[in-house]
Image (cartoon, rainbow, N blue to C red):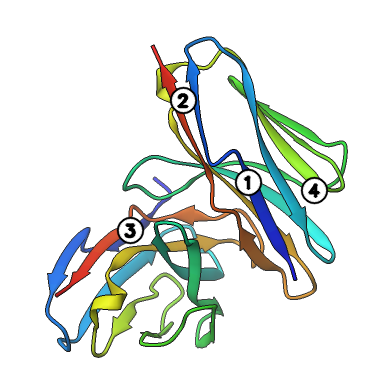
């Protein structure tokens, strides 16, 4: 089944404790992206990647890092999480930039 | 500034009561418009892509249309399982940036 898999689904952590949210897709998609979704603010892009070893900032990149060492994987790293990073996070992929996305199921992160 | 606006923010319908959701946009160089459905706590699910004014797409009770300024998602005889948030997104410009609306929350009562 074609899908984007995110882990974990839920995560509660403390301020400053480094964490990684994994994302993997099995559709051989070139383009991958991370979004956060907050009430009243909608979906905001954090980082995106157009191919292996090619990443770029989205609209809200501060406090986040990404890497794209393999085509299928695009982990999101929070080096020192803060409470304002409490949010619902989605990984998404598409064949090309600007194409229809397949989204993961989401990761609900709470930073206390 | 490129912008996508969805209306209404929320809509409550009775089962079988048809209606339309609106997505209006002001962007430079439209390259495509997407409709997604999102259930609470889940990732958006792709519904339609429209590329040019006059284009229409249908899927079950949903029909999406596109003009030069806006898109409509028509819901015919909705059922409770159509309850969800419907998101609109536009691809614009040479950098093919995706711009999202805030969504319309639809509730269909039995």
Q: In this view, does A104 lie to the left or right of B50?
A: left
Q: Dot 4: what SS? A: loop
Tell me the residue at 29%/71% (across/down): A22
The residue shown at (66%, 52%) is B5
Task: Give the mark toward the camera: 2 or 4.
Answer: 2
Return the residue at label 1: B6
Q: Position of residue A1 (x, y in %)?
A: 39, 45
Q: In this view, does A64 lie above or below A112?
A: below
Residue tagged 3: A5
Q: What element carries label 1?
A: strand
Residue receiving disc 4: B51
- Within 10 Å of disc 4 (Cα), the crowding (few <14, some 14-19, many 20+) is some
Q: Which of marks 4 and 1 is nearer the N terminus?
A: 1
Can you say which quadrant of the picture contains the N terminus of chain B? bottom right
Classify mark 3: helix, strand or loop. strand
CA gap, disc 4 and disc 3 = 29 Å
Residue named by callout 2: B82
Q: Mark 3 lies on which chain?
A: A
Q: Do labels 4 and 3 share a chain?
A: no
Labels 4, 3: front one: 4
Q: Dot 2 falls on which chain?
A: B
Pointers 4 and 1 in contact (CB under 8 A)? no
Coordinates of residue B10 in the picture (x, y in percent)? 50, 36
């Amino acid at each position: 089944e074609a899908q984007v898999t995110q882990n974990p689904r839920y995560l509660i952590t403390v301020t400053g404790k480094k964490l990684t949210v994994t994302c993997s897709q099995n559709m051989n998609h070139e383009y991958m992206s991370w979004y956060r979704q907050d009430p009243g603010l909608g979906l905001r892009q954090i980082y995106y990647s157009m191919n292996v070893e090619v990443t770029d900032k989205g609209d809200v990149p501060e406090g986040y890092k990404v890497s794209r060492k393999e085509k299928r994987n695009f982990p999101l790293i929070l080096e020192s999480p803060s409470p304002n990073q409490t949010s619902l996070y989605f990984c998404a992929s598409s064949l090309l930039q600007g194409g229809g996305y397949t989204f993961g199921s989401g990761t609900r992160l709470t930073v206390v | 500034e490129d912008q996508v606006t969805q209306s209404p923010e929320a809509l409550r319908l009775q089962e079988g009561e048809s209606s339309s959701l609106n997505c209006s946009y002001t962007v430079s160089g439209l390259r495509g418009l997407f409709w997604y459905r999102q259930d609470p706590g889940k990732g958006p699910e792709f519904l339609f892509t429209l590329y040019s004014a006059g284009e229409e797409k249908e899927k079950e009770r949903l029909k999406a249309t596109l003009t030069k300024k806006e898109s409509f998602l028509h819901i015919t005889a909705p059922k409770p399982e159509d309850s969800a948030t419907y998101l609109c997104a536009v691809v614009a410009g040479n950098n093919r940036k995706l711009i999202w609306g805030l969504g319309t929350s639809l509730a269909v009562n039995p």
